[in-house]
Image (cartoon, rainbow, N blue to C red):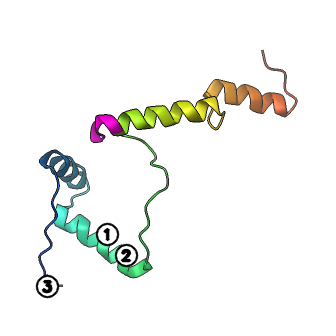
Amino acid sequence: MEKTTTLTVQMDPVTEKKLENIFSRFGLSMSDAVDLFFHQVLLTERVSLPEVPLSVNADLMTKEQFLTEIREGLEDARAKRYQDVSEFQKEFLESRGYDVL
């Protein structure tokens, strides 16, 4: 398909370089990645973004974003919305009648 429109995106150079590195691992240029995203939106008529990332790359965050994530994580832990894995395992086994040492 012939491309006849130019789209200009403004972003800081550090973000651009990091995105180029990620896309290059998939054999994609920035233009290819944007084109794929737009075609997905056309096919689904939705913008689908994951609710929670599978992993968090602190190198891609600003200091403020990183500190916000830490604060929210601590609030979640205090409210027991998330638990330490060993604590979760203990509670899980005890709730099913297993003796936990």
Q: Mark 2 points at which residue?
A: 41
Q: Which label belongs to residue 2?
A: 3
Furthest residue toward top: 101
Vertical comparison of 18 with 45: above or below: above
Spot occupied by residue 20 in the image (x, y as percentages of width and height): 18, 53
Identify the amino acid type marked 3. Glu
Q: Do the residues labelled 2 and 3 touch (CB within 8 Å)?
A: no
Q: Is mark 2 on a helix, strand or loop?
A: helix
Q: Does residue 18 appear anywhere in the picture? A: yes
Who's the residue at 84% across and 21% down the image? Answer: 99
Q: How crowded is mark 3: few (under 14 residues within 10 Å), some or many (20 or more)?
A: few
* Left or right for 16, reference 40: left
Query: In whole angstroms, how far apart are the C-alphas of marks 1 and 2?
Result: 6 Å
Q: Which of 95 and 45 is in front in this view?
A: 45
Query: In whole angstroms, how far apart are the C-alphas of marks 3 and 1?
Result: 17 Å
Q: Quadrant of the N terminus?
A: bottom left
Query: In whole angstroms, how far apart are the C-alphas of marks 2 and 3?
Result: 19 Å
Q: Are marks 1 and 2 in contact (CB under 8 Å)?
A: yes
- Earlier in the chain: of badge 2 and badge 3, it is 3
Q: Does residue 29 appear anywhere in the picture? A: no
Q: Which of 43 and 8 is in front in this view?
A: 8
Who's the residue at 24% across and 50% down the image? Answer: 22
Q: Which label belongs to residue 37?
A: 1
Residues rendered magenta in the picture? 58-64
Who's the residue at 15% across and 50% down the image? Answer: 12
- Earlier in the chain: of badge 3 and badge 1, it is 3
Spot occupied by residue 3 in the image (x, y as percentages of width and height): 14, 81
Chief secondary structure of the magenta span? helix
